[in-house]
Amino acid sequence: MTGLQLPTTVPGARILGIGSFQPERVVTNQDLEKIVETDDAWIRSRVGIAERRVAGPDESLPWMAVTAGRAAITDAGVDPSDLDAVVVANCTMPNPIPNAAAQVATGVGANGIAAFDLNAACAGFSYGLAVASDMVRAGTARTVLVVGAEKLSDWIDWQDRSTCIIFADAAGAAVVGVADDASVGIGPVSWGSAGDVASTIRILGETTNKLHQEGQAVFRWATSQIAPVALDAIARAGLEPSDIDVLIPHQANLRIVEAIAKKLRAKGAREDMVVADDIVTSGNTSSASIPMALDHMRAAGRVRSGDTLLLVGFGAGLSYAGQVVVCP
């Protein structure tokens, strides 16, 4: 009997290109003042958001994912025919079937390849990046498109100021491929979950079918539990906090972002470490926030090719994941 044949493994994977998409419609804090009891100062003091983007009826989650995916493919300098798989991280599809990924694969011009959705909510992109990296390293695929896309506006109660001020719509994407020079471009993932507090972020399916969040509980959890995950990701990559050039945490809340950065600096991260603050003009876009923040920061010159980036996602589940990557 002939033994089973396995694919040839490779030493490492890296990000080849990135891209993102945001709807044109901007909703400011002043706009929200007209529909719910709130004001600009209150919103900025609690979550740090000045404005967010909301998709129109023709801008579906798969459509936004396709647009971001195409941008990442172009940035990576690959052809859609080079893709072996598409992973779409999301938690806001209108229905569980059909999934987004197969539609995205066809939409970017790669019909017939492996495609699946992944739901780890706001940690989804980091989960997807870890899965794609492992697929490439194991030889299951050579080139994978990972997209984080959300249309949270479909799931928000616009009369609930605890959520309508925070969430927004967008998509961000990355192409993951073989590290040609045998160098590692995506470090080991540090991930986990806290199902004992899962009810702090949930869809109220039994009543309104809208998103509910216990803001203070989530804030306390994130500000106490996520910095250790970030430090573990650094250690797993064989680095020190001082090696990190750029911190890109999930853009959940500016106060949470700043708290994580402060704790990392207390453990040796540099004072000149750049910290993503895309939350201010983009809102919380769940799984789209990390890749979109990276794309925006690179366009603004705040991140350069070769920089060492620390990505860390966290959110509903509760789920969390982080890894160190090299900027393409």
Image (cartoon, grey):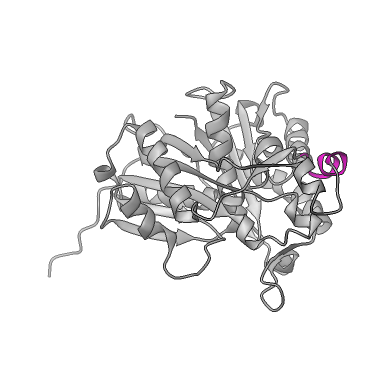
Name the side, left or right, on which 307 lies relative to 253: left
Determine whether 209 is above or below 123 in the image: below
Which residue appears farthest toward the front when viewing the image? 34
Q: Residue at x 47, y 23 (%)?
A: 305
Relative to the observer, which residue lies in front, 14 or 235? Answer: 14
Q: Which residues are magenta?
A: 40-48
Q: From where the camera sits, is residue 160 visible? A: yes
Which residue appears farthest toward the bottom when viewing the image? 206
Name the side, left or right, on which 302 lies relative to 21: right
Determine whether 47 is above or below 111 in the image: above
Is 44 in the magenta?
Answer: yes
Question: Residue 272's quadrant in the figure?
Answer: top right
What is the x, y in percent for residue 306? 48, 24
Q: Residue at x 77, y 48 (%)?
A: 32
Is 55 in the magenta?
Answer: no
What is the x, y in percent for residue 246? 61, 29
